[in-house]
Amino acid sequence: MSIRVQKRDGRLEEFDANKIRQGLIAAGATDQEAENITQEVENWAVANAAKGFVRTAAIREKVLSSLRLVNPQAAAAFESYQKPTKA
């Protein structure tokens, strides 16, 4: 089953687990933590995709709740990151 992600602006794009993994590593999670959380979030997204999509905000919250349990410092870094807005 293909899952799509609904961005803040309403656009839909394909779910890309690699984006989650890269964000986790950049925030300071270990490779193993990133791999485990990415798999957990992907499974969660499949189970919770309404009408074939899940919102980015819901994915972010799931990532944060999982990351807080295993690496609170990386969770704080991940949470404080804001994607630059396009001018």
Image (cartoon, rainbow, N blue to C red):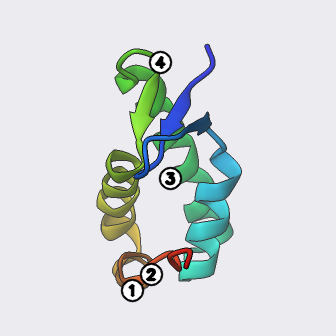
Where residue 70 sits in the image (x, y, percent)?
39, 68
Query: Mark 2 is on which residue type?
Result: Tyr
| Crowd around label 4: few <14 · some 14–19 · many ≥20 (10 Å) | some
Query: Image point 35% across, 83% down: which residue?
Result: 76
In the image, residue 66 sits, relative to residue 45, either above or below, namely below
- Residue receiving disc 1: 73
Query: Mark 1 is on which residue type?
Result: Gln
Where residue 68 sits in the image (x, y, percent)?
31, 69
In terms of sequence position, does the residue under pointer 4 or pointer 2 come before the other? 4
Q: Nearer the viewer, residue 38 or 18?
A: 18
In terms of sequence position, does the residue under pointer 1 or pointer 4 come before the other? 4
- Residue receiving disc 2: 81
Question: In the image, which disc is placed on residue 52?
Answer: 4
Local SS, label 4: loop
Query: Image point 55% across, 63% down: which residue?
Result: 33
Local SS, label 3: helix
Query: Mark 4 is on which residue type?
Result: Gly
**How far is mark 1 from mark 2, CA to CA?**
13 Å
Question: In the image, which disc is placed on residue 37?
Answer: 3
Q: Which quadrant of the figure has residue 2?
A: top right
Q: Nearer the viewer, residue 13 or 3?
A: 13
Instruction: Tell me the quarter of the image containing the C terminus.
Output: bottom right
In terms of sequence position, does the residue under pointer 3 or pointer 4 come before the other? 3
